[in-house]
Image: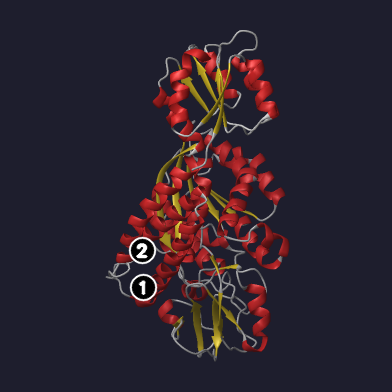
């Protein structure tokens, strides 16, 4: 067992010998001093794991010693001990970044608990996390044997995300590997679930089915609209549930989290299909048939999402909602800053839609740029970059300003993304789309059943460019690669974040309702 070294400064140090003996018997090495000056000098000369400082000492006070020690060694943990319960003293100590604050008289058990909180925290957290996850591991694995419904699968995914973030915080790599294997098993079973049920959800009115993209506005957003209280609908493209959980603590400073739900993205899990479905309230084939002027097909070069505001206007009219609304799509930093500067102009609207594209751009940049791939080599780093961007983004400025007034805020996305690892060979002609997680075209060639095939697109409410058009979706962590350029695809795209197919990460996505704490 590691022996920790403790520096203890108190002008009545002789009276603390029983406490010192108590700690020594438990494996701690104590260096006692009776003044602040010696504490500053010794802390600069020697290594200590923690410092105890009496607040009131003759000569140099504990607060003065604290300031000098922190200047020399800013990361050295310090516990302040004092007889004084004045609020100002406490605030000064906390402002100087103490790690704990104890008020005399103290007993040995208090001291030991304070030490363990600081020095043994990581070990204790890992041990407790391991124990709790081992119990949860068995429950989750047993659930895979049951015939779960869409709500139960959403709960399983949330649990897996919870434990993934717990392992990350504890830096628990060994159990993290076990969790990763369980995520693989979960995705295997989830994809089987989707293959069995997705077509029925779309065609059987009596089927037990989740909320899907094209139902989101009508069933979840429109009921929130109230006269005199603006609603901000913020869609962050490609925001996974784990990324939401990463930024949640940041938003919790300004907003109450009124509800945290999930819904299911339609297939393909791409912006062109799922986001257009959100704003139109229609499935893709319905959009293509009803609004051929607004629907942009796979074979066309222009952006597939240029008419989201038009789709939204039509959906509002269809639902007899005669309201004032705004639509803003943010693709560049300057656009975000401009919107942040003018956000007060939107409070007279009933509904304000803000589409933010950064996270999706990040995932694509990680694929195309080696530097970004180095910055985000794994899931944890990918979440970290997302959080860092969010904190410093114009979107955060927008949300801060909204939080000062009475308004509802909805944060959601159109689809998620998955880190792909396994190539899957597929053959198609030149007209086949380039997405790595789904293929649309005629005469698609592949072997085996390790994909999700839609040979009749009309049953999936997907457009058909000709009579023999079919769709194929990659499942789990696979990505499509062409045999004639196989090595290039494998080397370039392996371990990149892609979307369009079927996985927990792509399909089950967050829908969050917030209200301001300050208004």
What residue sits 40% from the left and 80% below the top? 459
Where residue 120 appears, as percent x and y from the top left, is: 48, 39
Label 2 secondary element: helix
Q: Nearer the viewer, residue 209 or 368?
A: 368
In space, the residues marked 2 and 1 are separated at their CA atoms by: 9 Å
* Residue 193, numbered circle: 1
213, 246: nearer the viewer: 246
The image quadrant that residue 193 belongs to is bottom left
Q: Position of residue 438 (x, y in %)?
A: 54, 77
Q: Please name the colour scheme applied to the rendered image.
A: secondary structure
- Say whether residue 44 is left or right of residue 508: right
Earlier-in-chain disc, 2 versus 1: 2
Determine if residue 230 is in view. no
Residue visible at 48% across and 31% down in the picture = 115
Residue 406 position, x and y percent, is 48, 35
Task: Tell me the residue that label 2 is attached to.
Answer: 153
Residue located at (48% from left, 23% from top): 20
Query: Does 75 appear above or below 258?
Result: above
Residue 272 vs 481, above or below: the answer is above
**Residue nearer the viewer, 64 or 368:** 64
Q: Residue 14, position in %: x, y?
A: 51, 13
Q: Is residue 420 left or right of residue 163?
A: right
Viewer-proximal residue among 196 and 412: 196
Tell me, yes or no, if residue 61 can be seen here. yes
In contact (CB < 8 Å): disc 2 and disc 1: yes
Q: Which mark is residue 504?
A: none
């Amino acid at each position: 067992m590691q022996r920790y070294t403790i520096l203890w400064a108190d002008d009545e140090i002789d009276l603390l010998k029983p406490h010192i003996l108590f700690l020594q018997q438990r494996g701690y090495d104590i260096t006692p001093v009776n003044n602040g000056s010696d504490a500053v000098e010794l802390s600069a000369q020697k290594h200590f794991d923690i410092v105890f400082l009496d607040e009131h000492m003759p000569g140099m006070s504990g607060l003065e010693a604290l300031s000098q020690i922190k200047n020399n060694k800013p990361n050295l943990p310090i516990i302040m001990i004092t007889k004084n319960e004045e609020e100002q003293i406490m605030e000064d100590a906390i402002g100087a970044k103490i790690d704990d604050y104890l008020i005399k008289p103290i007993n040995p058990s208090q001291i030991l608990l304070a030490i363990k909180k600081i020095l043994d925290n990581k070990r204790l957290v890992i041990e407790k996390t391991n124990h709790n996850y081992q119990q949860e591991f068995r429950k989750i694995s047993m659930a895979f044997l049951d015939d779960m419904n869409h709500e139960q699968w959403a709960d399983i995914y949330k649990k897996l995300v919870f434990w993934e973030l717990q392992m990350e915080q504890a830096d628990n790599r060994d159990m993290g590997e076990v969790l990763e294997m369980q995520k693989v098993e979960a995705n295997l079973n989830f994809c089987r679930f989707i293959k069995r049920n997705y077509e029925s959800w779309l065609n059987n009115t009596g089927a037990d089915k989740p909320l899907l993209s094209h139902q989101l506005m009508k069933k979840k957003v429109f009921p929130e609209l109230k006269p005199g209280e603006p609603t901000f609908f913020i869609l962050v493209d490609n925001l996974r549930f784990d990324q939401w959980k990463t930024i949640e603590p940041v938003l919790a400073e300004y907003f109450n989290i009124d509800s945290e739900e999930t819904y299911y993205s339609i297939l393909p899990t791409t912006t062109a299909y799922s986001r257009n479905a959100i704003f139109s309230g229609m499935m893709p084939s319905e959009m293509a048939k009803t609004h051929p002027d607004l629907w942009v097909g796979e074979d066309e070069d222009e952006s597939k999402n240029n008419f989201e505001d038009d789709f939204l206007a039509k959906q509002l009219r269809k639902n007899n909602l005669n309201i004032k609304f705004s639509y803003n799509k943010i693709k560049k930093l300057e656009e975000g800053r401009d919107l942040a500067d003018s956000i007060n102009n939107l409070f007279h609207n009933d509904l304000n839609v803000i589409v933010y594209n950064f996270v999706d751009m990040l995932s694509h940049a990680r694929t195309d740029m080696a530097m970004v791939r180095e910055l985000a080599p794994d899931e944890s780093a990918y979440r970290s970059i997302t959080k860092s961007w969010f904190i410093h983004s114009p979107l955060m400025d927008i949300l801060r300003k909204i939080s000062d007034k009475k308004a509802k805020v909805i944060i959601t996305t159109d689809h998620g993304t998955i880190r792909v690892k396994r190539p899957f060979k597929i053959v198609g002609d030149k007209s086949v789309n380039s997405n790595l997680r789904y293929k649309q075209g005629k005469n698609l060639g592949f072997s085996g059943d390790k994909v999700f095939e839609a040979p009749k697109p009309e049953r999936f409410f997907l457009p058909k460019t000709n009579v023999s058009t079919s769709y194929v979706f990659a499942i789990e962590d696979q990505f499509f690669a062409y045999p004639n350029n196989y090595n290039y695809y494998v080397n370039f795209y392996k371990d990149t974040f892609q979307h369009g197919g079927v996985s927990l990460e792509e399909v089950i996505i967050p829908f969050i309702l917030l209200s301001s704490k300050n208004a």
